[in-house]
Image (tube, rainbow, N blue to C red):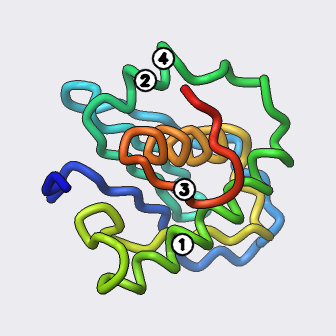
Amino acid sequence: MKNLICTLIVLLTIIGCSASKSNVASAEKTKTGSNDTIKIENKELEYEVIIIEPGFDFWLQSTALPRGYYSQSYLENKNKFYVMEWNNRVRQPQIYSPNLYEMTIDYNPTINYGYEVNYLIYNYMIYFQNKYNQRLYGRVPPR
């Protein structure tokens, strides 16, 4: 497999969230560089999502189903299982490539991250599974 050092980072950091059911709809979305990095952050709740993957932003704009197609609860449910399996694979580098699964994702299903965060995580998981021929959980839409 290709060496993906510094090309794949999915990071969801949640630091000191005291209100676990808070709405994070006020998240700021930033695109940086050559459209290889998507960053969403909410400074009030002290979390950020950073997706660095060449081609993901283009895929998101051209191939992913539009925002609003899935409900937030659907995305949250899928993300819960995708992230759980992702983290299991990070913890087993002898079985799963550490070049693909570099770091764990700190995703707490009891926190309302809002639609945008869940939409991006879900679509990244679909993109990742299709691009690298991986199966994290259930049927993966062939996009």
Lower sequence index among marks 2 and 3: 2
Dot 1 falls on a residue whose secondary structure is loop
Residue at image point 41% right, 43% down:
39
Cβ atoms under marks 2 and 4 closer than 8 Å: yes
Lower sequence index among marks 2 and 1: 2
Looking at the image, is mark 2 or mark 3 nearer the viewer? 3
Q: In this view, does 98 lie to the left or right of 116?
A: left
Looking at the image, is mark 2 or mark 1 nearer the viewer? 2
Looking at the figure, which quarter contains the C terminus? top right
Please, is residue 85 above or below residue 127 in the view? below
For the residue pair 97 and 57, the one nearer the viewer reads as 97
Residue position for label 3 = 135
Expressed as whole percent of the image width and height from the top left, the position of residue 61 reads 48, 17
Residue at image point 28% right, 26% down:
35
Tell me the amino acid under the disc marked 4: Gln
Dot 4 falls on a residue whose secondary structure is helix
Lower sequence index among marks 1 and 4: 4
Residue position for label 2 = 59
- Cα separation, mark 3 vs mark 1, equals 20 Å
Residue position for label 4 = 61
- Cα separation, mark 2 vs mark 3, equals 19 Å
Quarter of the figure with residue 79: bottom right
Residue at image point 80% right, 70% down:
110
Q: In this view, does 19 lie to the left or right of 79?
A: right
Instruction: Characterize the local packing of mark 1: few (<14), some (14-19) or many (20 or more) Cα atoms within 10 angstroms.
Output: some
Identify the mark at residue 106; answer none if there is no mark: 1
Expressed as whole percent of the image width and height from the top left, the position of residue 4 reads 18, 54
